[in-house]
Image (spheres, grey):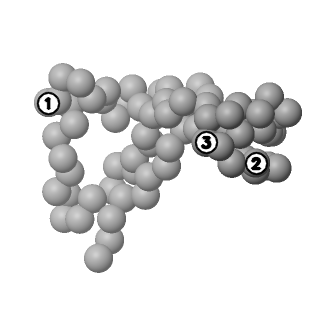
Amino acid sequence: VPFPLSMVDRITPVTTPADIEDFKMGAGIADKWPVVSEDFMQWVVEDKFVDGLRPKYEEVSTAPSMASLLSSFMKDV
């Protein structure tokens, strides 16, 4: 079954000593290398759907248009 590819635009920076301490204080676990990441920013979804059955994202007021998503993605890459 074919389906569109997707990804999340999110950065995972190097872990700092402050991240290790924050995790220890917050979770109560002494992890020597916790993985931290920036806040979730956006989804990028390939515009390729089965038999052209594409959800009408542009009709949902809270979702950006596919053109807007692609434009934002291209600026970041």
Q: Which residue is mark 3?
A: 27
Say which element carries label 3: helix
Q: Which residue is mark 2?
A: 30
Q: Few, some or many C-alpha atoms within 10 Å of disc 3 (few <14, some 14-19, many ≥20)?
A: few
Q: CA distance from mark 2 to mark 1?
A: 47 Å
Residue 54 picture location, percent across and down: 20, 51
Say which element carries label 1: helix
Residue 43 seen in the current view: yes
Q: Which residue is mark 1?
A: 59
Residue 37 seen in the current view: no
Residue 46 picture location, percent across and down: 40, 50
Which residue type carries mark 1? Glu
Q: Is residue 26 above or below residue 55?
A: above
Query: How many labels sit on residues?
Result: 3
Single out the mark in the foreground, 1 or 3.
Answer: 3
Say which element carries label 2: loop
Q: CA distance from mark 2 to mark 3?
A: 8 Å
Q: Quadrant of residue 18?
A: top right
Q: Few, some or many C-alpha atoms within 10 Å of disc 2 (few <14, some 14-19, many ≥20)?
A: few
Residue 2 vs residue 30: left or right? left
For the residues bearing labels 1 and 3, Cβ distance under 8 angstroms: no
Residue 35 picture location, percent across and down: 69, 46
Which residue type carries mark 3? Ala
The residue at 68%/34% (across/down) is 25
